[in-house]
């Protein structure tokens, strides 16, 4: 593992797209994922397009989240645009990671993506309303304490997402 990490570190400093592709493919490796992500973040030129390809090909949530983390840390206009493209990804954990990543890189909406952010705000508000209605429905029912606590956690997370989204406008 030590030799692999040394080789990865050296390869990260080489500005060759094929080597970058090989490094990006190592994001699938559970043991090397974090190390490779750090190297790719430090040497981020020309990796975002390849990360985008891997994002849409991969079915491993850990890989998707790591790609989002790299994009947020890179924080360039291209990286921010790629994050916005993933705002409506079907998995909630990925959506949360996208919003946190956008917040991390201090995203500010412009006229090209303001509509996407506004629609996402509307979705989050709809979710908050739905959760509130559910909480009202079960508050007097027996044996629903765990459900109430779960709904409260979802509601708090939705409020956090809402405030982050509002900060982008």
Image (cartoon, rainbow, N blue to C red):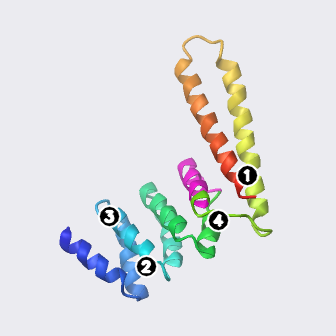
Mark 2 / mark 4, whichever is N-terminal: 2
CB under 8 Å between callouts 1 and 4? no
Q: Residues within 10 Å of mark 3 (few under 14, many from 20)?
A: few
Question: What residue is drawn where x is 70% and y is 36%?
Answer: 128
Magenta residues span 88-102
**Image location (x, y in percent) of residue 164:** 66, 51
Q: Nearer the viewer, mark 1 or mark 4?
A: 1
In the image, which is nearer the foreground, mark 2 or mark 4? 2
Quick one: label 3 or label 2, which is nearer the N terminus?
Answer: 3
Task: Tell me, yes or no, whether the two marked residues, 3 and 4, touch with CB atoms within 8 Å.
Answer: no
Q: Which residue is mark 4?
A: 85
In space, the residues marked 3 and 1 are separated at their CA atoms by 36 Å
Q: Residue at the location (76% across, 68% down)?
A: 110
Which residue is the site of mark 3?
29
Q: Which mark is residue 166?
A: 1
Quarter the C terminus occupies: bottom right
In which image quadrant can residue 9 be found?
Answer: bottom left
Label 1 vs 4, first from the N-terminus: 4
**Front-most of residues 23 and 59:** 23
Between the residue at mark 3 and the residue at mark 2, the CA separation in whole angstroms equals: 19 Å
Residues 35 and 82: in front is: 35
Q: CA distance from mark 1 to mark 4?
A: 17 Å
């Amino acid at each position: 593992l030590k030799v692999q990490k040394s080789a990865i570190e050296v390869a990260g400093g080489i500005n060759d797209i094929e080597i970058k592709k090989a490094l990006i493919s190592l994001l699938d490796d559970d043991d090397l994922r974090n190390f490779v992500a750090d190297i790719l973040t430090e040497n981020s030129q020309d990796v975002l397009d390849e990360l985008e390809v891997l994002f849409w090909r991969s079915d491993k949530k850990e890989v998707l989240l790591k790609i989002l983390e790299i994009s947020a840390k890179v924080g360039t206009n291209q990286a921010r645009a790629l994050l916005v493209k993933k705002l409506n990804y079907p998995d909630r954990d990925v959506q949360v990671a996208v919003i946190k990543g956008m917040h991390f890189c201090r995203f500010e909406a412009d006229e090209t993506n303001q509509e996407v952010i506004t629609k996402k705000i509307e979705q989050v508000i709809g979710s908050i309303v739905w959760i509130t209605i559910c909480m009202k429905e079960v508050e007097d029912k027996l044996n629903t304490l765990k459900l109430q606590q779960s709904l409260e956690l979802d509601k708090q997370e939705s409020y956090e997402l809402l405030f982050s989204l509002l900060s982008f406008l």
